[in-house]
Image (spheres, helix red, strand yellow):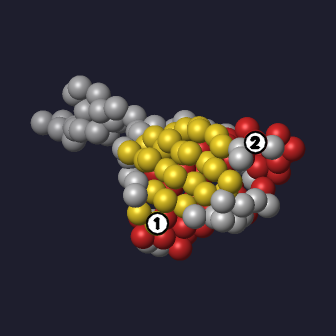
């Protein structure tokens, strides 16, 4: 029975997954993924890797995710599932790569600078 452990990251969210052969159950932090990610777009993001690779319903996924917001967490889970599927079957990598599911989106929030209101916004200039 093939199993694999991988991780995916997005912004400050980190997802660790355990992929085992099964019937398609996805558990996120002890809850069903539909309960943890309540909206349909987030549920679609989580399951996108399995649908694109044609392995929907073939694997059980147990996810531990922490940090970031709910969308960043969903995208971190998507990347981790895609990496795990490729680890088990390398022939599915081109299909996942074509949809952009194998690339880690490394955009992060820019830090606030001293003397600025936000990262780039300046305080209001007063001529007099």
Q: Considering depth in this image, is 105 or 125 the residue closer to the camera?
A: 105
Q: Residue at x 54, y 45 (%)?
A: 17
Farthest residue toward the front? 1
Q: How far across and how far down the image is residue 85, in percent?
A: 72, 46
User: Horizontally, is 92 left or right of 124 in the view?
Assistant: right
Q: Which residue is mark 2?
A: 88
Which residue is under mark 1? Answer: 32
Packing grade of label 2 (10 A; few <14, some 14-19, many >=20) is few
> Quick check: 103 above or below 31?
above
Q: Vertical placement of 62 versus 107: above or below?
A: below
Q: Residue at x 59, y 38 (%)?
A: 6
Nearer to the camera, 13 or 1? 1
From this viewpoint, is residue 64 visible? yes
Report the Cα–Cα distance between label 2 and label 1: 24 Å
Whichever of callouts 2 and 1 sits on the residue coming sooner in the sequence is 1
Q: Residue at x 12, y 36 (%)?
A: 128
- Residue shown at 75% from the left, 59% from the top: 55
User: Which label is found at residue 59?
Assistant: none
Give residue 121's position: percent from left, percent from top: 32, 39
Q: Is residue 2 left or right of residue 11?
A: right
Say left or right for 26 vs 123.
right
């Amino acid at each position: 029975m093939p199993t694999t452990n991988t991780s995916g990251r997005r912004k400050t969210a980190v997802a660790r997954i355990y992929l085992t052969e099964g019937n398609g159950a996805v558990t996120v932090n002890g809850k069903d993924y539909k309960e943890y990610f309540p909206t349909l777009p987030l549920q679609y993001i989580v399951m996108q890797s399995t649908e694109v690779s044609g392995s929907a319903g073939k694997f059980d996924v147990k996810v531990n995710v922490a940090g970031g917001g709910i969308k960043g967490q969903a995208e971190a889970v998507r990347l981790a599932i895609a990496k795990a599927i490729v680890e088990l079957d390398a022939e599915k990598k081109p299909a996942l790569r074509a949809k952009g599911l194998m690339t880690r989106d490394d955009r992060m929030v820019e830090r606030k600078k001293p003397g600025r209101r936000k990262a780039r916004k300046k305080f209001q200039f007063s001529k007099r």
